[in-house]
Image (cartoon, coloured by chain):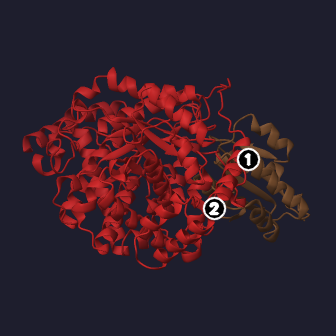
Chain colours: A brown, B red
Amino acid sequence: MADRTLRILVAKPGLDGHDRGAKIIARALRDAGMEVIYTGLHQTPEMIASAAVQEDVDAVGLSIMSGAHMTLFPAVIDLLKEKGAGDIGVFGGGIIPDDDIPRLKKLGVAEIFTPGSSTQDIVQWIRGHIQGRL
Amino acid sequence: MRVVARETARWDAETLGPVTAKTPLRQPSFFTDSGIPIPSVLTAAQRRGELQESLGLPGEFPYTRGVQPTMYRGRLWTMRMFAGFGSPEDTNQRFKYLMAHGTTGLSTAFDMPALMGYDADHPMSRGEVGKEGVAVSSLRDFEVLFDGIPLDQVTTSMTINASAIAALCMYIAVAEKQGIPMAKLGGTIQNDMLKEYIAQKEWIVPPRPAVRIVVDMIQYCSQNMPRWHAVSISGYHIREAGATAVQELAFTLADGIGYVEECVKRGLAVDDFAPRLSFFWDVHNDFFEEIAKFRAARRIWARVMRDRFGARDPRSLQLRTHAQTAGVSLTAQQPYNNVVRTALQALAAVLGGTQSLHTNSLDETYALPTEDAVTLALRTQQIIAHESGVDRVVDPLGGSYYIEYLTDEMERQALEYIRRIDEMGGIIRAVEEGYPQKEIGESAYRFQREVEEEKRLVVGVNAFQSDQHTAVEILRIDDQVAASQIARLRKVKAERDPQAVEKALAKVEAAARGTDNLMPPVLEAVRAYATLGEVSDVFRKVWGQYREGGAF
């Protein structure tokens, strides 16, 4: 396996404008030595999946506060699969009720980080679970 | 004063020195959350300025001690609980519930599609309808939302910005249907677009046309709606995005200055509109700093309005404000701790002299609040109001060496930011260049690092953790809401007069391309059941969709 720098797309699906968390994660991942691309706000699942493929990322981190995660997270995963990029890992965070976490995992979201998670936990998790794609 | 200074120096050497030499302080130095240094003791020696010059008396210039001479001895603050979720029927019920439990003003949260100017059936609205606020697309939804609520007997706050003009016109139109003229409507529409680009990030068009719409609304309301606040200049979102208290104070007042400048450029006389400008602060954890923020804000605004804009009407000089406890301070871990945080923050807002207050619910890091959680948050205010005794005295902390020191320091630091923004060419330019956004991003990241390095303790998160998981009940929004909203929207579109809609929207477009005030044509359009999305589409067509880049 090529030991290359991990490339992560931090994405804001949906219409909410709460980007404090997404930007903090983006900076923390960059400070941890990863290459980070941030989509900016108000992205559709289509925009996110296209950006992930174009940027050839290893993983996509989705941040959402609007409550639309049950619709938008699976949509991103499905679109990645459609584009033949189902091996791109998808993780997420935001205002996500506990009960939704197992459901999202079942739908293919690798991990969910809820409020209070430390950026270091997220860095560790990525290092442990996301492998650089060949 | 000199005696006090001499005495303090003596105390420092004789009393403090030996003690700290023996037992070091818990930290080498202490700072507020904004980074203001906290001296070992404050005395009369630190007090700057004449009493009348910087402090004054309540209800008098510079209003440091409050905008009314009586404050809560005259009337308690308005307990205004922000509510909105699901369908207009759901929120109408929550409004009636809150009114039955003693809330004294309505406050409406709209869903994300409404805030971004999309109807329920737009592809961008997928998964979002009714989730973070009430779903509205047309006047029909407003009719349901305010059904059975006499709009001349309540004051209503509407938290909506980019599509505020459509929402305000729908509110006016629904009041007309109740037989109430717009002149009798009391309330506030947030309508603060500058802070959208800075922090909240719900927008349709670029900053300059967006501010033009705000000025149209201020002008129209000042002439037709004497009881209406056409803008609520909001620090809340700036703070929630990670700003410090000083940055919240500075950027919010800079936004206020920006609106006043634009209105003056339009040719409005400052005293014709300034009395109806209102503000909205966050109340975070640092108790005394938050109190000082309210006081510093009033003093800066009074001086800016008098000295910079030549306002003469005392009401133009008085900064009236709503406040909300800090959602960002709530933790998912040990959620019942949030009740305590909210109570302390609410007390700070009251001691700071707020005119109205929303208290957050303990479950808001999970979802929108349940009825029980909202009731507890409202009871928190009622206990402060009716049991703590703080309502019986005006500005109880006035003259406290610490509070006055913090008020002075916050004022000084905020004015420094405002000076820098003026040098950049004003707040609109500063926002276009991303200056406040960048400053806030830095503060947010610094705060997070301090938490992770345990320089800053958050109970239940990085200290005093518990393995015990507290389950809280969650409010779930049925996906059926989207389907029923889309069905209602289709019915509205089928039943309305398409020619009237088309004609009205053409007038909106003509006004947008020209300089006529947009309020009359938008009002005509929504009366004809043109939707919020259709009005917003006209703006998108004329000015383009605004997008922010991916800088972080």
Camera-side residue: B218 or A97?
Answer: B218
Query: Would you say B42 lies left or right of B90 here?
Result: left
Name which residue type carries label 1: Ala
Whether residue B183 is visible: yes
* Furthest-bottom residue in this view: B514
Q: Quadrant of residue B191?
A: bottom left
Could you say which disc has been placed on residue B483 in the image? 1
Camera-side residue: A54 or B151?
Answer: B151
Disc 2 crowd, CA 10 A, few/some/many (<14, 14-19, 20+): many
Which quadrant: the C terminus of chain B?
A: bottom right
Query: Would you say A95 lies left or right of B228 here?
Result: right
Chain ID for label 1?
B
- Secondary structure under tag 2 reads loop
- Secondary structure under tag 1 reads helix
- Using the numbered discs, state the Cα–Cα distance from disc 2 to disc 1 in whole angstroms: 26 Å
Which quadrant: the N terminus of chain B?
A: top left
* Residue B448 x/y as whole percent: 56, 48
At 63% from the left edge and 38% from the top edge, which residue is drawn? B367
At 40% from the left edge and 55% from the top edge, which residue is drawn? B247
How many numbered marks, from 0 up?
2
Camera-side residue: A34 or B283?
Answer: B283
Name which residue type carries label 2: Leu
Query: Would you say B241 lies left or right of B22 here?
Result: right
Chain ID for label 2?
A
At 61% from the left edge and 62% from the top edge, which residue is drawn? B497
Q: Are marks 2 and 1 on the same chain?
A: no
Between disc 2 and disc 1, the foreground one is 1
Name the residue tied to disc 2: A41
